[in-house]
Image: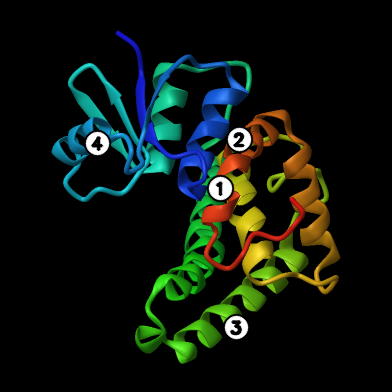
Amino acid sequence: MPLILYAHPFSSYCQKALIAFYENDVPFELRMLSPEHEANQAAFAELWPIKRFPLLVEGDRPVPEATVIIEYLQVHYPGPVSLIPASPDVALEVRFLDRFFDNYVSAPQMRIVFDALRAPGDRDPYGVTLARQQLDIAYQWLEDNLGKGPWAMGDAFTLADCAAAPSLFYADWTHPMDGRFPRVAAYRRRLLARPAFARAVEEARPYRPLFPLGAPDRD
C-alpha cells in the first residue's frame, strides 16, 4: 500500500516533509491540496479535521505534522541519510533546532504573510513589527550559534536542516537579511544547493504568484 502525502508544494511545512522523502528516495503518492482538487480536500478534512498540512497516510493510519512525518519515515523507511542521529543527546539537539526553526523563524515569518492576506482594515501593524523583531533576534542567534560544519549540526544533514531550509528560504523573502547575517545567508545558500531541497523549490516555482508579499525575483 503506497504512502500518501496530502500537501501543497508551495507550503513551507510540506517542503520540510518532502525533503525527507527526497533525501532517502522514499516513494509516495502526492494528493494535491488546492481548491481545484475538491476530492482531495474533502478526504483530507475527514482524515484530519484540524486541516493543517502536510498529512501522511499509510493504510488506515494518518500521521500529521511535518516533524512527526519525518520521524515516522526514519522509523519505518530508513535510508542512507539518517535524519535523526542515533545518539540520544545529539538527537535532542537536532530536535531543539527543529523547534527553533519552526517556532522562531517560520512562525513569525508566517504571521507577516498571513497579515498581508487580510483586508486592509483587519491588519495588525504592531504584530507585524513584533514578528520582524523576532526574526532579527532569531537571525542573530543563528549567526552566533551555527556550527562550523555545512549543516545545522555540523557535517550531518538532519531533521534540523529539513526545518531550516524552507523556514530560511521564505523568511529571507519576507524579512530580508540584507547582508546583516552572513553566516546565516551562507547556510541558506547551502540548503538551496542541496538536491532534495532544490527539487522541492523547483516543484514550487510555478506557485510563486501566490506569495502575498510578492515573490522576489530570486531564490
Q: Which numbered disc, 2 or 3, marks the residue closer to the eye?
A: 2
State the separation of the CA atoms marked 4 and 3: 38 Å
Q: Earlier in the sequence, mark 2 or mark 3?
A: 3
Q: Earlier in the sequence, mark 3 or mark 1?
A: 3
* Residue type highlighted by circle 3: Gln
Q: Percent x, y for residue 155? A: 77, 37
Pick whichever, 123 or 179, lies toward us.
123
Q: Which numbered disc, 4 or 2, marks the residue closer to the eye?
A: 4
Label 2 element class: helix
Q: Are marks 2 and 3 in contact (CB under 8 Å)?
A: no
State the separation of the CA atoms marked 4 and 1: 29 Å
Q: Percent x, y for residue 82? A: 58, 26
Residue 86 visible (yes or no): no
Image quarter of the N terminus: top left
**Residue 163 — which label?**
1
Residue on which the image places disc 4:
38
Name the residue at 61% across, 25% down. 23
Residue on which the image places disc 3:
133
State the separation of the CA atoms marked 4 and 2: 23 Å
* Residue type highlighted by circle 2: Ala
Q: Residues within 10 Å of mark 3 (few under 14, many from 20)?
A: some
* Residue type highlighted by circle 4: Glu
Residue on which the image places disc 2:
200
